[in-house]
Structure formats: structure tokens, C-alpha cells
Image: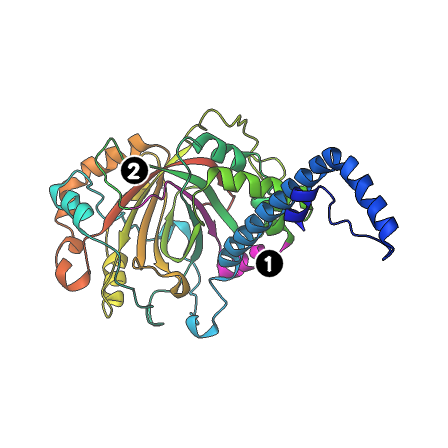
Amino acid sequence: IFFRSMMTGTCGASPSSPDMYYYGTAMKEQQAARPANAWRGVAVAVAAALVTLFSLGYIAVMRDLAIFAFAPADVVTATRTISVAPRPAASRLPQYPNEPLMASHPQYSSALQSTSLDEPATAPPSNLLPAQRYVATNQFQVRPGSDAKFEARWANRKSRLAQLDGFRFFTLLRRVDLGGTVQYDDDINYVSLTVWEGKDAFTAWRKGEAFKEAHGGNDFFSFVKMVTSSLLTIKGAPKPAFYEGLIPVANTPEPTKTVNGWRAVEANGEDLLEGECFVAMNRFKVREGQYEAFEARWSKRDSKLLDQPGFRGFWLGRNDPKTMEGVNYVAMTVWDSEENFIAWRDVNDKKSKEGPVSSGRSEMFVEFPKPAFYVGKLRIESELGI
């Protein structure tokens, strides 16, 4: 129909009567009106192209939302039951440092250049440490030159995240190379990080109205706006990853002021948002059969993280089985600034190299741990703390 409209300008018109006289008259009238109708055909073709574009965008976005919303729990056989012990009081929380993040160390530099994550990971057994947090992340490849627009999209979104039950912490992470000392082997440059009290709180959010509001709303025009923004700023589909938060350590909560559950930050789409925290992450690929030993080493470590200036929180993340893609554990620390992290790292450099995780790497790990560093934007901390 579209091609016929373009060629004849009739928009699919056909004779309404078999009488040839009337048919000939109709054809003459159509030929006389063909210049005007040609533009009408072009308009129809353009409209069809736009509908096709937004339809493809709709399919892509809904696929991504479906992955993010249902990946953790859509396969019953991939889940496991864990008896969660009561969380100890803050004064009795153990202190666990982040795994060494010596990106400038020659051993780490060579590992970052020579290792890969091609070997699939195996889901951990059920007799491990109980989960005390649930961490949801989404990884993005933002197109070159679109960083500020991408951040503005997050800043200007409609969300009431801070008002939801079980919410603890959120930040939008922009990956940095820590002064050129880190080389990354992928194009992921932004990560959204949300910490929940438990998986039930996360599940309630992803099945509720707040999830729809934060991902385009229920009306068509809001959805079209979201699709257009996504196509222009993001390359490929986002990659969600979920973690059970183990042995958390959190400093005194510093609740963030929000407006209707979200940050009121001015974002013009031209300038990057200011950094409000710093996140250091170490990614581990632990060998099958070594999960218990790996977690035990972390649980027995002694440190003074709570005494470090600018320290906000720590947790060891065990990748949810459904979303494993090679890395099955991550260690995260949250700091007020990059300077706070570097000061702690420099002081603990020697201790980290001689620590228990540094020994026995060949038996415990498939490859050397990989560090990653991020500047956090739009930081939101609840009264529960990190």
C-alpha cells in the first residue's frame, strides 16, 4: 500500500463501480489531483516509517525491561532457599576490607590485559553465608558524546524510589580509569546501582506501579519520549546483574534529602553532573567448589574500615544464579570521594598484598580479580543506611 501510494499518489484508491465511464472519469480526476496526492503518499510513507521505528524501539525496550524485571526469578529451579539470620547490631558488625584494588601493581596490569570472562560460571551451592542485602545493577554502553544527556535523563526521570519499603541506597555510576591506571576490556561506562533490604523488597518494586513510572509511565507519549532518548544515547541493550549482599558493613546512615522520593538536581543535558561518592569494585571468578572457602576468608578478615575517613559502606556480592556471566562474586566499597579511597588504599597497600586472598590464587580463582572504579551521581541514602 505504501509503495502504491508513493507511485500513484492515490493512497490505494480503486474504482467504486465496474462501469468504465465512471472508472475513466475517476482516473482523470485522480490524475489531475496527482501532484497534491503525491505529497499525501509521501506523508503516509513517512508516518509508516516512524511507526515502524517506534515499534522496533518498543520491542527492544520492553525486552530490556523484561530482562531486568524477570531475570532473577523466572526459573524456579535456579533459585535457592536461604535461612537469613538476624542482622547483628551496628556496634557488633564485623569489619571487612575491600579486596586489594591495586590497579597500578604490575600483576594487576598484566591480568587486566590478558584475561577474559568467556568461561561460564557455576551457581554456588545453598550452604553458604546468608544474604543480608539484595543489590540490583544495570550496565549501559552510552554512546560517545551522550554522557551528559544520559545523566540528565536519569536526573529528570519520575521516580519515588526513596519512599519505597526496603530501599537502602542508590547511585548512578560513571566508570573512571583512576588516572589512567586501569584498562577495561568492555564498553560498559555507566552502571545503575540499587541496594535493597532483601530480594522481597526488590521484587515488590519491579512488580509495582513505581517500576512502570520510572521506566516511561503508562501513557503513550511518555513511552515514546523514553524510547527516543534510549535510541539516541544508548548503544545496545542494558545488561542487568543481581547480587545477594553478604557480610555488609555500613557507617552511620546519612539520609539524603529528596523531593517525592527522588533527587531534585538541575541537569541540562550538556554538562556532567557532579560526583557525590566513589565506588571501588573488585570482580572475582571463583572456581567451582571454592565458594565456601572464598566466603570464609572474607568473613574472617579483620580491618578498620569503619574508622577510615570517608568510608560509607561495604558488601560482598554473590551473583544471583540466573544472571551469572563469568564473574560470580564482587566486592564493593562506597566512599565519600575518590581521595578517601586512595588514602585508604595507599595505607593498606602492603597489608593487602600479604593478605590471605593473595595466597593460593591458582587454587581459588580462575583468573586474577579485576578492579573497576566509578564516580557516583544522584546518590540517595535512606535512613536504613547502605
Scheme of image coloration: rainbow
- Would you say residue 96 sits in the magenta stretch? no
User: Which residue shows up at 43% across the image and 41% down it?
Assistant: 252
User: Which residue shows up at 19% across the image and 56% down it?
Assistant: 367
Q: Which mark is residue 24?
A: none
User: Which residue shows up at 24% across the image and 33% down it?
Assistant: 343
Q: Are marks 1 and 2 in contact (CB under 8 Å)?
A: no
Q: Secondary structure at mark 1?
A: loop
Residue 152 x/y as whole percent? 52, 32
Q: Which residues are magenta?
A: 186-208
Q: Quadrant of residue 44?
A: top right
Q: Amino acid at mark 1?
A: Lys
Residue 279 x/y as whole percent? 35, 40
Q: Which mark is residue 207?
A: 1
Which is more toward the observer, 282 or 15? Answer: 15
Q: Is residue 345 left or right of residue 86?
A: left
**Mark 2 sits on what residue?**
308
User: Tag 2 or tag 1, which sits nearer the N-term?
Assistant: 1
Q: Amino acid at mark 2?
A: Gln
Residue 148 x/y as whole percent? 46, 30
Vertically, is 245 above or below 181?
below
User: Which residue shows up at 64% across the image and 46% down it?
Assistant: 48
Figure disc tally: 2
Note whether residue 339 is visible: yes
* Residue located farthest toward the bottom when viewing the structure as drawn: 77
Note whether residue 215 is visible: no
Q: Nearer the viewer, mark 1 or mark 2?
A: 1
- Would you say residue 191 sits in the magenta stretch? yes
> Mark 2, residues whose alpha carbon is within 10 Å: few (<14), some, or many (≥20)?
some
